[in-house]
Amino acid sequence: MSAPRSRRRFNDQTASGLLLAGPAMLGLLLFILAPFLIALALAFTNLRLGSPLPLEFVGLKQFQRIFADPDFLQALSNNLLCALTVVPLQTALALGLALLLNRGLRGTVVFRTLFFMPVVFPMSLVAVVWVLIYAPGPDGMMNGFLDLVTLGAWEPRDFLRDPMLAMPALMLLSIWQGAGFQMVILLAGLQQIPHELYEAAALDGAGRWSQFRHVTLPQLRNPLVFVVLVTSILAFRLFDQVQIMTRGGPNGATTTVMYEAVQAVFTRQQVARASAMTVVFFLLVLAVTWLQRRLARQEREIG
């Protein structure tokens, strides 16, 4: 009697699970898997809009061409540099803000709203505002601020047209704009840590730093892993700021894989070439995500 009852319960739970997961699975199928498969198929062709040549299968030629293109390699290196810089700095800033707001000081709600506000605004609006902040000449806000901080030693620079400063300027904007989202997630994680753990650590003679290392960080492990994963994906997806503020310049200093793909398909109508770029981009983000998950799992097993 127990086997049929348990089988019936399993079937009911399976049907309920499929019904609940169905809309999400359908969305993943339509908006992620299907576009990727179409891009993968187009990447092995010579499709170019307006070309008189017939559609042909060209094998790996599109991938060979993009990896021989110095602009694409520059875009890849810019994406890696952005991810390696933005992810640790933005996560550290968000963690610092979350720790500060978790202390229960007066005005916490106001500061939490102010820190989260940049996340609400569209990136196009934020980028336009930061173009004004980076305005060249002594009247620019950033130049004026640095002149004030350095007591007049700073010489005004054109941040968005300087090959050495253009990418750091975009990364500073990205860190400022996204830190609020991470802060909210980490703050929620901090508020879930039982206070008894800190009391027990204090009884054992642990100071603030020891409590942070041995209580706060282990308890924040899952929120931190999530934050790092999301930030990595967003850092690799850098496009809006580039399109609005620098258009990939100067001399390719701020171009990214997404920007090169959009330029290929919408400016030069090279659909197959853009598809190959997006396939490489997808596999790169997938590899980074898998590597992070792998390292996090190993740390958990060691711990």
Image (cartoon, rainbow, N blue to C red):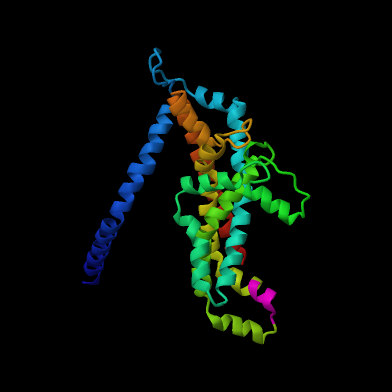
What residue is at 48 percent from the left and 65 percent from the top?
Answer: 113
- Residue sitting nearer the eye, 39 or 172: 172
Q: Position of residue 187 (x, y in %)?
A: 52, 69
Quarter the C terminus occupies:
bottom right
Left or right, residue 82 beside residue 6: right
Q: Is residue 226 above or below residue 131?
A: below
**Segment tinted magenta in the rendering:** 206-212
Give the residue furthest to the front.
139
- Residue sitting nearer the eye, 282 or 250: 250
What residue is at 63 percent from the left and 33 percent from the top?
Answer: 250
- Residue sitting nearer the eye, 94 or 111: 111
Left or right, residue 134 beside residue 24: right
Q: Is the stretch drawn in magenta largely helix, strand or loop?
A: helix
Give the residue furthest to the top.
52
Left or right, residue 76 beside residue 54: right
- Residue sitting nearer the eye, 226 or 7: 226
Q: Report if residue 38 is visible in the image.
A: yes
* Residue 71 falls inside the magenta stretch: no
Q: Position of residue 229 (x, y in %)?
A: 53, 54
Q: Position of residue 52 (x, y in %)?
A: 39, 12
Q: Report if residue 81 is visible in the image.
A: no
What residue is at 58 percent from the left and 81 percent from the top?
Answer: 197
Write down the quadrant of residue 245 in the picture: top right
Give the residue furthest to the bottom.
203
Q: Position of residue 45 (x, y in %)?
A: 43, 22
Write down the quadrant of residue 47 in the picture: top left
Q: How many marks?
A: 0
Q: Is residue 130 above or below residue 280?
A: below
Quarter the N terminus occupies:
bottom left
